[in-house]
Amino acid sequence: MFQQLLDRLIEQVPEALAATFNDRDGDPICSRTIQVSNEGLQLLGAYQHVVKRHLQQAVEEFDRGEVKQVAFATDQHWILMMGAKEQCTLVLVMQREGLLGRARFYMEQAVEALNQEL
């Protein structure tokens, strides 16, 4: 079921190059890649908790809320991370020209569906 949800997310976001759903330790539960190496995708998944922890510490200076989504850009890509139940995380890599709002919308739907399966 997890793989079907990732496949659907890739179809809904035409600029998507890869997606992975990782457990709390950063290990992939399932992944789908089109143009990103599996190793690179696994590294993003492995480090997503470190990124979130450091961002959470910085955000606490002005906001007591929990970091729920992270998006950062390189010259060519957007990398989006969104939390799910049981400290799992959905990571999406897409072309920089892609519509960030559309990707976030479909990622939120995917996280809801993934949470129901956990």
Image (cartoon, grey):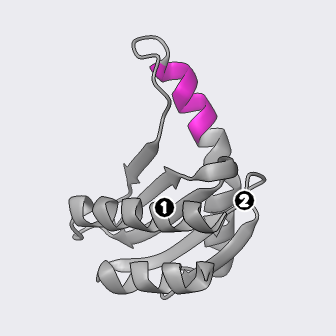
Question: How many residues crowd around disc 1 within 10 Å: few (fewer than 14), some, or many (20 or more)?
Answer: many
- Can you give x and y, in whole percent of width and height, for residue 96 in the image? 28, 67
Position of the N terminus, as image quadrant, is: bottom right
Quarter holding residue 108: bottom left
Residue 67 visible in the shown view: yes
Q: Main secondary structure of the magenta part?
A: helix
Which tag, 1 or 2, sits closer to the chain's start?
A: 2
Residue that label 1 marks: 111
Residue 78 visible in the shown view: no
As drawn, which residue projects farthest toward the front?
116
Residue range in magenta is 52-59
Q: Secondary structure at mark 2?
A: loop
Q: Residue at x 58, y 71 (%)?
A: 20
Three-letter residue code for mark 2: Asp
Three-letter residue code for mark 1: Val
Q: Secondary structure at mark 1?
A: helix
Q: Residue at x 72, y 59 (%)?
A: 23
- Can you give x and y, in whole percent of width and height, for residue 19 in the image? 52, 74
As drawn, is 24 to the left or to the right of 40?
Answer: right
Residue that label 2 marks: 23
Question: How many residues crowd around disc 2 within 10 Å: few (fewer than 14), some, or many (20 or more)?
Answer: some
- The residue closer to the viewer here, 23 or 37, is 23
Q: Residue at x 52, y 62 (%)?
A: 91
